[in-house]
Structures are given as structure tokens and as C-alpha cells.
Amino acid sequence: MKSFSTIFLLFFTLVSFCQSEVKNVDVEKSTVTWKGTKLIGGSHAGNIKLISGFLSFTDDKISGGKFVINMKAISSTDLKGKSKLKIEKHLKASRFFGVEKHPTSSFLITKISYISDNQYQITGNFTIKDISKSNTFILKITKHTASGKIILKRKDFNIRYGSGFFGSIADKGISNKFVLNINLIF
């Protein structure tokens, strides 16, 4: 009984010294931008809005987190007028993000490796179209900001361009990789 009391007291003491805090992401000030490229040159870029997010910290070091993206709010920033409306319609369609059936995407941190005072290697599960894939990237954290560049492979999430025979050719004309740049304000 005495050893159990000693172990309990030691555990309680260690837990007391760890300072844990959950910081909510300010979805109005935070940004998520995307960029997709064509294999023959050129690219498209835009924004996606956050719905929610949080980062957990223990002893002032990141220890967890999650953010949720509103896929219905995906937009183009490099085009205007009819071209802008056309690409946004394509991105929201079932062959791309299928936002009617899959209105949100998310990222959940599963592993964190310390690199330096304000940089961490973050591994987590990115879920798009109800398909989850592990992804690793570098996250830089300052006093009220966490930012990083996430490179994803669209075919991992069944994101395809076009349909039928010509759709197959069109799909091969755009890069399999697309980039999300996140800037989370908390």
C-alpha cells in the first residue's frame, strides 16, 4: 500500500508541473490557401475557409490539434468573371472535392517531433472526401501563429478531373500534387 501511495504522489507531482492549454483558432483571421499546377505550365490558386480549429500546448510546446475546413467555401483568387465561376464549379463538383456530399475536410495531429524552438515536424491524418491519409509537414509556431505548407496528392483522395475518354487525358494534364498553405491565428 505504501508503494502505491508513493507512485500516486509521484504521478500527481509530475502532472502538476505540466502546464496544458488548448488554444482555439481564430477562423476569421486564419487563412488556408491552395495552389494546383498544370503539367504543361500554369497554375490556379485560391482560398478555403476554416470552420473550426484548436491547438493543444503542454509546457508551451505543441502537443496536439485539429482544424476543419469548409470545402463549400473553396474559391479561386487567380481568375475573374466566368473563368472564376467555372473553376469554382469544377472544384466543388463530385470529380474534385464533391462538396455536396463532403462539405468539410479536416486535419488531426497524431505525432509531433520537435525540431527547434519554434519548428515542429507534424504528422497527422488529413481527411478529404471521407478518405484519410497520413501527411507530414513542418509547422512553424510563433506567439499567436502556426503556419505550414502541406503537400497533398489529389489521387490519394480520389480527386480526378474530367470524365470519359477525354477526361482521362485532362486528368493527366494537371499535377497530382497540390499545396495548402495554412496560417492559423490563435
Image (cartoon, rainbow, N blue to C red):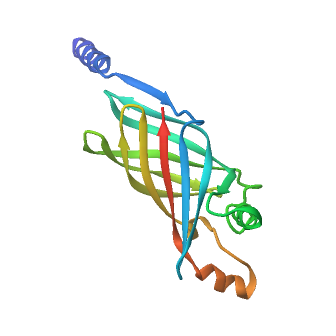
On-image quarter of the N terminus: top left
The number of callouts visible is 0
Give the camera-side residue of 115 and 75.
Answer: 75
Residue 56 place in picture, x, y as percent = 43, 32
**Vertical position of residue 4 compared to residue 130: above or below:** above
Residue 168 place in picture, x, y as percent = 66, 84
**Vertical position of residue 113 compared to residue 29: above or below:** below
Residue 179 place in picture, x, y as percent = 50, 61
Q: Residue at x 47, y 28 (%)?
A: 23
Give the camera-side residue of 175 and 29.
Answer: 29
Q: Residue 156 appears in which quarter of the rendering?
A: bottom right
**Vertical position of residue 142 compared to residue 9: above or below:** below
Q: Residue 131 appears in which quarter of the rendering?
A: bottom right
Q: Residue at x 59, y 81 (%)?
A: 173
Q: Residue placed farthest to the front in the image?
A: 80
Give the camera-side residue of 83 and 123.
Answer: 83
**Relative horizontal placement of residue 109, taking residue 60 as reference (left or right):** right
Q: Residue at x 75, y 62 (%)?
A: 81
**Relative horizontal placement of residue 3, taking residue 164 as reference (left or right):** left
Q: Residue at x 55, y 33 (%)?
A: 26
**Vertical position of residue 20 compared to residue 12: above or below:** below
Residue 101 place in picture, x, y as percent = 75, 55
Q: Residue 4 appears in which quarter of the rendering?
A: top left
